[in-house]
Image (cartoon, coloured by chain):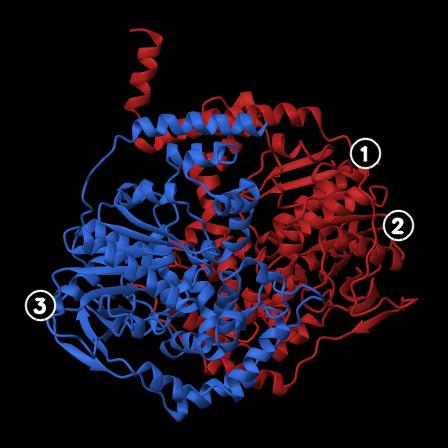
Chain colours: A blue, B red
Amino acid sequence: MYTEILLALVLGGVIYFLLQRSKKHQLKSEDGWWGVGNPPEREGDVSIRPYTVQTDDEELEDLYRRIDQTRPTSSLEDSQFNYGFNSHCLQKVVSYWRHDFDWRRQVEKLNKYPHYKTNIEGIDVHYVHARPTNLPEGVTAVPLLMVHGWPGSFYEFYGMIPLLTEPSNPGDTVFEVVCPSIPGYGFSEAPHKKGFDSVCAARVFHKLMKRLGFRQFCTHGGDWGWLVTTNMAQLEPQIVRGMHLNFAPPALLGLTTVLSLLLGRRFPKLFGFDDVDVQHIYPVFQNLVVETIKESGYLHIQATKPDTVGRGLNDSPVGLAAYILEKFSTWTDRDFRNLDDGGLTRKFSMDDLLTNVMIYWTSGCIVSSMRFYKENFSKLEQPHSKMPVHVPTGFACFPNELVHTPKLWVEQKYRQLKTFTRMARGGHFSAMEEPLLMAQDIQNFVKTLKKE
Amino acid sequence: MKASEALKQAFFSLDASQRQLVVAGSAVALGGLLTCCYQVYRRRKTQNIPLGSGWWGAGQQPRSEDEKVFPFEVQTSDAEIQDLYDRIDGTRYSEPLEDAGFLYGFNSTYLKKVVYYWRHKFDWKKQVAILNQYPHFKTKIEGLDVHFIRVRPPHRHGQRVLPLMLVHGWPGSFYEFYRILPLLTDPRGDLAFEVICPSIPGYGFSEAPHKQGFNSLAAARIFHKLMERLGFSEYYLQGGDWGSLITTNMAQMKPECVRGLHLNMLNGKHRGFGVLFAMMFGNYLPWLFGFTREDVKRLFGSKGFLERNFYELLRESGYFHIQATKPDTTGCGLNNSPVGLAAYILEKFSTWTDFSNRDLEDGGLERKFSLDDLLTNIMIYWITGSIVSSMRFYKENMENRPDHIAGVFVPTGLAAFPNEIMHVPQVWAQDRYRNISSYSYMPRGGHFAAFEEPQLLADDLRKFVGKVEKSG
């Protein structure tokens, strides 16, 4: 029976492919305005203001009071993380948060690199700008824009920044790193109007880089950062010198992808599949369909009712922590679902995990962060999802990434794939989990770019 | 023009989305055709589903269980109310997007109004007295304290009294039936009901299961045991939402005990290419599929089958998806934020009563319900802290079970409300419910039928029961 269904799919795919005559359009985008009310007559403030992350006693006391007021619900016996965040584990995390976590010290750590804010299209965009300190004579630093995703933040890149701005290897490229917060996330103001999707974010970040004086730069992105940097490359390909990704789920099922799914098990070499690929893709139904359904509930509700689902999380720090940290557990390794402690501290320190959660908590941005899902899924078909990318691309394939994409699939969209590296270990939050491996791959990619 | 040329032209003259529809339709039709052949072969043959057994308490099962029925009273305290107020006062609101209505979920601006009423006007002590107007009880079954209310009509000579169990769903509770109860236990007329309204374990005042696997079959079995313990051997059942599935399971498990089954929400478990072709041609050839004009109106609406049944369902089922996979995560924050809980639950009372409520700034919430009633329902979730366990029920019911294939052979009455989430025509319902005594198109009402249109539901229930009793 399955062969008939798959044959029918192929038939459908062929017809679809024929209808989709290859379009080499450039992505277009109109200007937007996301502030309150109507846009002003004259151009807004374009100044760049330094920003410092701050906290005070009141903020901490409010947090502690809410933590103390938590009404826990016991998890079912022997359910580990299969029903979501386990209550026993949550109790331990919260206890650390309440008694051992030092937010003031973490704020100092956040302020290690200079932060700024600038007003673009009516909203304040926050970013971290880390400049190299030991630049050798005659060498210019390569500007690198790094974009985070959900439920992450600019903080995910803190482990990598020193490796990029002050590489130990003399042959390595020195980077000047800009890590913005997507509007609606962290310290960036949330849009007040409907319709702020990844293309809008891409446009805003182009304006940011222009305002900072960069005429060409490289990008790195994972999760939403993947889509925003992809859109940036589609909007202005001459400006994006190279783009590095660790996440690139196929948006459309083209003919090649479908064929590779059907026949890849029997003829892996034909499609460039190796053992790791085969292991992650087959059996297709279990790995691609069932697993996706199991893990995409959050995506479904955030893409339809973000204001509802985020509402309680902005009042309950423990609820927020459970919601966010569940992803840091499951998206790092699916097998962590069967562990009582969700394997949280195997790859991350509790301090790092909670700092990321505190960014969501202190800025109160959980609802606006979720709205990004709805904005991006409002139309099931976006023009940019059909357009290929012609900017030189480097892809780091981490073994435990949420969606496994073999080289063939990445090439379907990224027509100038220069490097495709199989990483030794790491999951979805690879920048935070394996900063050294990621930084090395970026170095490798940029070296390849320079050779050409 | 040759036929192939004409077909090609016709195909390319359609716009992109229609073309995709045809392509998708043909591709799936092939698969569907084969599935249908397979299904026809495996047609519903089973009559009863096994009763099964279970124990859901904490730790090890003891040798014997206390079978007494204890009276129970809903209580509250100043401390409880003060804690609620403190949390409400500590709410951190987020600004809604401009002109978004309820399209992104519960609108923050309107939420503030609801919360203001809750904080300053809503009288919980008065509502508790209203809750206690009917006698409440608890009894231990399979390791769990099961809560229920039992309402007997005042004794009247010559009046027939039939036992009836009403089962609620999510995010409702036994309280949804408080408006229909007086209509069913009315001392006038020659037929009245003795009504039992339990709380599903994990909801409200019923203890939550401690073990994994508590699904609708377990709930059905426990409710049968409850009726047995109360001395009933034959009874009627009515349900919507989860109540619909549980009462259906009850009818499948012990049909000899169920005199009649009345539902206001149907499970659309239909497969086969019938649905595919109905989707494409049902609008034009309704008689071919057994649709009435009303069916066509409700299935296709003004925007077409795909939009009304597929896309709408996709838009509205995010909660289902996340609760069926990560209930512990989703419910955690809601158990600590009363405003978050209110937004989450009330969004359903807005949207599932009428989809067009999403376009309104106030979600049309107070058009059919009073704030007192809505908030009382929420308070039941809040004071019992049962939101997480209520969500787990979604995950527990995901596994493949025998009842998916088994039919229902007890006399069934179906009330189809126009604004229910999905319309199931009689011809589709017959696939599962083999003994439909009555199928009524209700003139108005949505998902929370008992709460919203108690008179209409009560009338239909009486009509159905009358029919069943007459045929004896």
Q: Quadrant of residue A218?
A: bottom left
Q: Residues within 10 Å of mark 2 (few under 14, many from 20)?
A: some
Residue drawn at x 19%, y 68% as measured from the top left: A122
What amino acid is found at the position of numbered circle 3 in the picture?
Glu
Q: Return the residue found at the far top.
A: B2
Horizontal arrangement in the rendering, residue A19 relative to residue A41 (left or right): right
Q: Is residue A81 visible?
A: yes
Q: Which mark is residue A43?
A: 3
Where residue A219 appears, x then y in whole percent? 25, 60
Front residue of this view, candidates B94 and A188: A188
User: CA separation, marks 3 and 2?
Assistant: 79 Å
Q: Amino acid at mark 1?
A: Ser
Residue B69 at x, y = what percent?
Answer: 86, 68
Specify which label sits upstream in the sequence, 1 or 2: 2
Chain of the residue under the numbered disc 1 shown in the image = B
Left or right of A155, for residue B144: right
Q: CA distance from mark 1 to mark 2?
A: 19 Å
Q: Which mark is residue B233?
A: 2
